[in-house]
DNA sequence: AACATGACGTTGC
DNA sequence: CGCAACGCCATGT
């Protein structure tokens, strides 16, 4: 459709529920390829203040569990605060345990009993 | 079409 | 743990 890659990114990030986080590569994977991580970052970087209200960009972090925005350190503390506000805490190392807060994806395979 | 840039990721030193 | 190099994909010039 006429949506750009960025639009797709916003749509997906919008689906990330509070209390959970996704990595750039993860988002990229759901969009088609893990290598899209960079492109995903670009898309969120281009996010405007208006769109930022609809898109929980703070729930997208790096693959190593650290926060991104190394060029815009102003957003770093903000992201940390927003996440903490949702219950997402970091380890003493300053990293977020993806094993606990990691988003399972747009369609979780939560199917313990299977059918 | 080619080159340069970037909220990334992984590996090597 | 910090820094550098390479790979990767989308976008802007």
Image (cartoon, coloured by chain):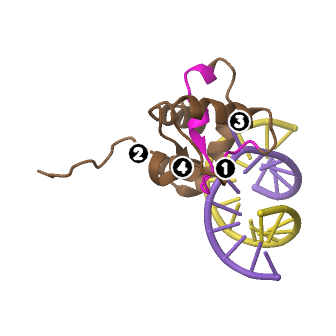
Chain colours: A brown, B purple, C yellow
Q: Examine the image and state in which quarter residue B12 appears.
A: bottom right
* Image position, residue A102 (x, y; %): 47, 48
Chain of the residue under the numbered disc 1 shown in the image: A
Q: CA distance from mark 2 to mark 3?
A: 22 Å
- Element carrying mark 3: helix
Which residue position is annotated with label 2?
A105
Mark 1: give few (<14), some (14-19) or many (20+) Cα within 10 Å. few
Which residue position is annotated with label 1?
A94
Kindly indicate whether the residues beneath marks 1 and 4 are on one polypeptide chain: yes
Mark 2: give few (<14), some (14-19) or many (20+) Cα within 10 Å. some
Image depth: mark 3 or mark 1 in front: 1
Q: CA distance from mark 3 to mark 1?
A: 23 Å
Asked if the residue under mark 4 is in contact with the one under mark 1, i.e. CB atoms within 8 Å, the reply is no
Asked if the residue under mark 1 is in contact with the one under mark 3, i.e. CB atoms within 8 Å, the reply is no
Asked if the residue under mark 2 is in contact with the one under mark 4, i.e. CB atoms within 8 Å, the reply is no
Q: Is residue A28 above or below residue A17?
A: below
Magenta stretch: includes residue A55: yes
Horizontal side of residue A1 vs A38, given as left or right: left
Which residue position is annotated with label 4?
A28
User: Quick one: A114 or A42, which is closer to the camera?
Assistant: A114
Mark 3: give few (<14), some (14-19) or many (20+) Cα within 10 Å. few
Which residue position is annotated with label 3?
A45
In the rendered structure, which segment of residues is drawn in magenta? A51-69
Q: Say which label, 1 or 2, has the lower sequence index.
A: 1
- Element carrying mark 2: loop
Q: Is residue A4 visible?
A: no
User: Quick one: A16 or A38, which is closer to the camera?
Assistant: A16
Asked if the residue under mark 2 is in contact with the one under mark 1, i.e. CB atoms within 8 Å, the reply is no
Q: CA distance from mark 4 to mark 3?
A: 15 Å
Q: Say which label, 4 or 3, has the lower sequence index.
A: 4
Horizontal side of residue A22 vs A80, given as left or right: left
Query: Mark on residue A63?
Result: none
């Amino acid at each position: 459709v006429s949506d750009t890659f960025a639009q797709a990114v916003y749509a997906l990030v919008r689906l990330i529920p509070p209390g959970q986080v996704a990595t750039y590569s993860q988002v990229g994977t759901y969009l088609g390829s893990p290598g899209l991580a960079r492109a995903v970052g670009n898309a969120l970087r281009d996010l405007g203040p208006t769109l930022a209200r609809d898109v929980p960009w703070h729930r997208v972090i790096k693959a190593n569990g650290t926060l991104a925005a190394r060029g815009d350190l102003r957003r770093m503390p903000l992201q940390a605060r927003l996440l903490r506000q949702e219950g997402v805490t970091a380890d003493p190392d300053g990293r977020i345990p993806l094993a606990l807060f990691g988003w399972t994806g747009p369609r979780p395979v939560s199917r313990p009993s299977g059918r």
